[in-house]
Amino acid sequence: MKPRVWIRHGVLITYGAALDTALHRHHAVQLVWARGASSCQWRGGNTTGNLIIDSQVEHKLQLDEGWILLIEPQCELGVKLRQMIDGKEVVQFEPLLAPYINEHPKSNPNTQLTPLFSALNLSLSVDPKLTSTLDRRIQTLLAKLDRCLQGGCQKPARWRASDIANELAMSESRFRHLFRNEMGIAWRPYLRWRRLSCAITAMMSGHSATESAHLTGFADSAHLSRTFRAMFGISIQQARTLFSSKER
């Protein structure tokens, strides 16, 4: 079935069938609520059903139909999910969920996701806030990056570590250390993850792969496609098919 896609602060949500993917890893924590058959392969083995997949775990997911949420580990929801899996790479959960709502998701996924979040004893939020434990300087930086989701993308050249360090009144080495310590990931790969989110937003707005690559700081569509495949396990052509069925 043709997927639907929503992008919110800290969360990318899709509903539908997962495309056949290659083994891949990404920064997000992944929450899978299967309506049809699902399976996940990773170095620890294979499992099926409803899943939480930790950040940076290399895996391959197949899903006939259902919800997939990619969640920033440092947002409130991401922190709670990581506490639930308690250091494990992939966790299967089989809560007694209320039935799927019969109507297919339209412009807002909140109603359809309520049974899932209630069963997991989590607060439903598709606009999760950053955890308050983050250093305020890092919170300020991430808030600036979030402007891309509000249609205010800034030129990629403005995101050099040296420039950010100057803005934050610290040395570049201190900024890099602080960012890795607070976020659990180095600045450059995190920025690459955020630029992919911007590329998704661009494609959902109707831009071609080449236009999206140039808008978000990739050298060309081939560079964007390689990065897509490494992080999501799909090609840019598959991504274009997916994101052309957008819901904002």
Image (cartoon, grey):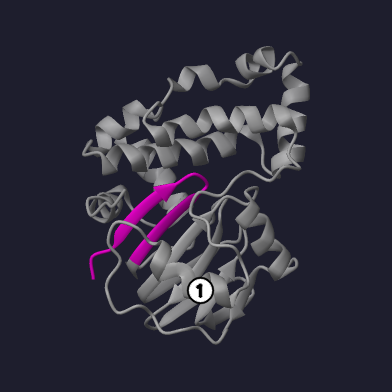
Q: Which residue is painted at 56% across and 73% down in the image?
A: 118
Regarding residue 169, the answer to whether it shows in the image is: yes
Displayed quadrant of residue 160: top right
Mark 1 Cα within 10 Å, few/some/many (few <14, many 20+)? some
Q: Which residue is painted at 41% across and 51% down in the image?
A: 229
Q: Which residue is painted at 26% across and 30% down in the image?
A: 211
Residue furthest bottom in the image? 96
Up-down relation of residue 74 to residue 175 (above or below):
below
Is residue 8 in the magenta section? yes
Q: Which residue is painted at 62% across and 62% down in the image?
A: 54
Q: Nearer the viewer, residue 105 or 60?
A: 105
Query: Disc 1 marks which residue?
Result: 116
Magenta residues, as a range?
1-15
Query: Residue 30's x, y, as percent?
Result: 53, 62
Position of the N terminus by quadrant: bottom left
Up-down relation of residue 96 to residue 182 (above or below):
below
Q: Nearer the viewer, residue 101 or 145?
A: 101
Up-down relation of residue 158 to residue 230 (above or below):
above
Query: Residue 43's x, y, as percent?
Result: 61, 71
Q: Amino acid at mark 1?
A: Leu
- Left or right, 32 with reference to 77: left
Displayed quadrant of residue 174: top right
Q: Nearer the viewer, residue 191 or 69?
A: 69
Q: Secondary structure at mark 1?
A: helix
Up-down relation of residue 36 to residue 196 (above or below):
below
